[in-house]
Image: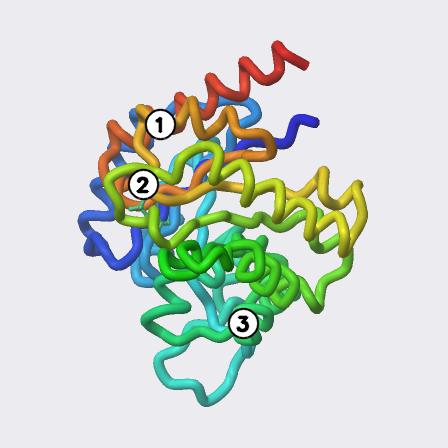
Amino acid sequence: MSRVKLVVANWKMYLSVHESSLLVNRLNKTVKVHRGVEVVLSPSYLSLQPISQEIDRRKFRLAAQDGYFIDEGAYTGAVSLSQMRDLVHYAIIGHSERRRYFHESLDEVRDKVAAAVRNGIVPILCVGETKEERAQRETKQVLHDQVVTALANLTSQDVENIVIAYEPVWAIGADQPAPPDAIAEAISWIRFQVRELYGQATEEAVRLLYGGSDEPEYVAAIMEVNGVDGLLVGRASLNYERFSDIVTGVHLAALSESKVE
Ligand code: PGA
């Protein structure tokens, strides 16, 4: 089953508005349009508006890195998903850095996923176990809890359109990505959860990404893992050459997959 591939650049809390513009300018020139590969940029809240005017819209869509689940009200400092609905196609929800440093609970992640869907924004739900959880052999339990809670308020039709990113915390900001067999095991477990909850058609439609130390040289091996539809890229997305090489790598993987089919 061939799903549209997806590459997401997570710029995290790097880059000023000016630096973001410079990077977009480079990416506009370097990244090619590839059929069957969607490329999404996720700058800081502050850069979303200017970047939306600067991106080559044939090549890029935008994602928020987070968003508050209440649409409006007295919540100083928060930016709601509702406020970003005309600006972004996607929103990264439940990134491990949000869970860890901002203490986002399973329920908060669930409410953010629901708020994204309610506002017509596609959530990119991040799930993944920590190093300690992996050592304790709790990976499956953790992934189960994160997936099942986050999807709790959604219909099967909603779930067909969302994106889930498997990001093992121990492979984020590391020297290399998780080994392909670990990715394969987690991805098939997540797909199994979705199938159990929503049935086979939904499981076949939902897109799953891998994130954690993605670099151009690892793309082919990761994209070969069954059920992986793309990448969520941190550090390498701050460099236009590495990021466009990653996009090219995903495109080549999509081409060879379509030949096999
Ligand atoms: P990294 O970050 O590519 O720098 O490991 C990935 C992420 O946190 O999404």
Q: Which residue is mark 3?
A: 106
Tag 3: amino acid: Leu
Q: Tell me which residue sits at (72%, 43%) in the image.
A: 203
Q: Tell me which residue sits at (47%, 55%) in the image.
A: 128
Outermost residue on the front side: it is 136
Say whether mark 2 is within 8 Å of ligand 1: yes
Q: Are marks 1 and 3 in contact (CB under 8 Å)?
A: no
Secondary structure of the residue carrying tag 3 is: helix
Mark 2 neighbour class, 10 Å CA radius: few under 14, some 14 to 19, many 20 or more: many
**Residue 62 point in image, percent of width and height:** 44, 48
Number of marks drawn: 3
Q: Which residue is mark 1?
A: 218
Q: CA distance from mark 2 to mark 3?
A: 24 Å
Secondary structure of the residue carrying tag 2 is: loop
Outermost residue on the bottom side: it is 74
In-image side of 24 versus 61 (left or right): left
Q: Quadrant of residue 29?
A: top left
Q: Which mark is residue 118?
A: none
Q: Which residue is mark 2?
A: 213
**Residue 17 point in image, percent of width and height:** 23, 55
User: Eyeballing the image, is 80 above or below 189?
Assistant: below
